[in-house]
Image (cartoon, rainbow, N blue to C red):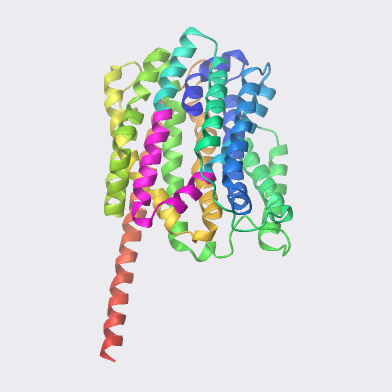
Amino acid sequence: MSTTMLFIAYPELVHFYNIDYEVMQWRNIVFWSFFGVFMPFFGIMAKMTNVKKMFLIGLGLFIISCLLSAFSSNWGMFLVGQSLQGLADAMIVPVQAVLIRNIFSEDKIGWAFGLQGSVMAASALLGPSLGGLIIQSMKWQMIFLLLGLIGLIALALGLMLVPNIEKSTKFIFRHLPIVGTLSLLITFISIQGIFISESEVWILFGFAGIATFLYVEFINKIQTKIIPQDLWSNKPFLINALRGFFIFLSINAIATFTPIYFRISQGYEASVVGMVLLASPIVMISLGAWGGKRVDKSLNKTMILGLTLLSIYSIGCILPGEKSFHYVYFVLVFIIGGIGAVMVLPAQNKVALTSSPKTETGTYMGLFQMVQFTTASLAGVLFAPIIQSTTNTEISVSGYQMIGVTSTVFFLCSMLIVFIEAKINRRKIVDNNVEIQLNNKE
């Protein structure tokens, strides 16, 4: 909800802090970097501590970050608040996967993720409409005050409703991957900083970060690793993570810049943008459980159909030129995108979860979700220079269309990976059957 509300407020933030859209991407960089990079860290911690406590502490930190963001008088303090919010979300998200793995049987995991997607879509459903209403009638700071209030309510509900899951190992502070996580955070921020800053300092930080990370993960024998020892032999998980990178980079690229495109290039009011963006969440709320059931019944076919619809969605977003189409057209496009999402997202999560060792659910899902969520900031950094116009108050229509074309290519690449994976699995089944027949003859 916080993400969809804030995307609509980007023009107000640019004006309030007197920055341009490239500088605005630092918000995405710090938020998504802290969010994504710290998920494996807290995924490992989930084995060592009570996940309910982690959930509640994360919500408390989320409330503090909202207050700090709301009352920030300068851009630097706002970024600190968004960094804390990313850290808070990183504590909360791995808990969800652990709970799903412990509560549901494997033949219900797709349905569970589909239902979870519906719940998340319900939040996104309120986000654009409330964000547009706030921007139109109040100051943008009210977005964070509202989020803080919702976080407080969630904290109270969490105390009452979130079940306790016993920790599987003893909590030992030195067994947390502190050095590896911090070095990866520095690396990730530095790589993105290189794209939007001319300073050579980011290059030095990037080399230092990646050198430290490689030393800790592959040379040092003492430090706890972020990467599990058997990860590289887990081909289903790795293939799914690669596919997830393509899918979520595309989804996040469109989600990041479409609200700005609607408001500036199409000339829509903030309330109209909110209404258009409601289309996908409404579909996800209505069809989330249905999409999850389709995944449990036929995973590959469901994913291929979903990726086809997402390709149509990405092309549909860029077909109109500047101020040329009525907003009803975009509502239909976002409905198609929502249907595609309810098929693809549960499938991705199910493959990641079922290909992870059960005792390492938090660790593996933390890594998978890191790939998933860090693409949000990466998408902003990669495409911000393309969409930035010659003036700070405009964006490039051709740049936005380039985003749509690139996203379509990534969706098609993801579909190709599904076909290759399915062919490999069929070959394995045939080879196993032949081996069984030969053994029976012997």
Percent x, y of residue 209: 70, 48
Q: Quadrant of residue 12?
A: top right
Q: Count up the numbered dots.
A: 0
Relative horizontal placement of residue 26, taking residue 113 as reference (left or right): right
Q: Nearer the viewer, residue 311 or 134?
A: 134
Location of the C terminus (image quadrant): bottom left
Q: Is residue 307 magenta?
A: no
Percent x, y of residue 441: 25, 89
Q: Nearer the viewer, residue 13 or 143?
A: 143
Percent x, y of residue 197: 64, 32
Q: Nearer the viewer, residue 160 or 124?
A: 160
Secondary structure mostly seen in the magenta stretch: helix
Decide if residue 313 is in sight here: no
Residue at image position (55%, 22%) is 149
What is the magenta range? 94-123
Q: Quadrant of residue 328?
A: top left
- Does 56 sit above or below residue 432? above
- Does 252 sit above or below residue 293? above
Relative horizontal placement of residue 25, taking residue 127 as reference (left or right): right
Residue at image position (31%, 60%) is 422
Q: Quadrant of residue 354?
A: bottom left
Decide if residue 205 is in sight here: yes
Q: Nearer the viewer, residue 66 or 398?
A: 66
Residue at image position (39%, 38%) is 117
- Does 282 sit above or below residue 98? above
Percent x, y of residue 111: 34, 47
Residue at image position (64%, 39%) is 189
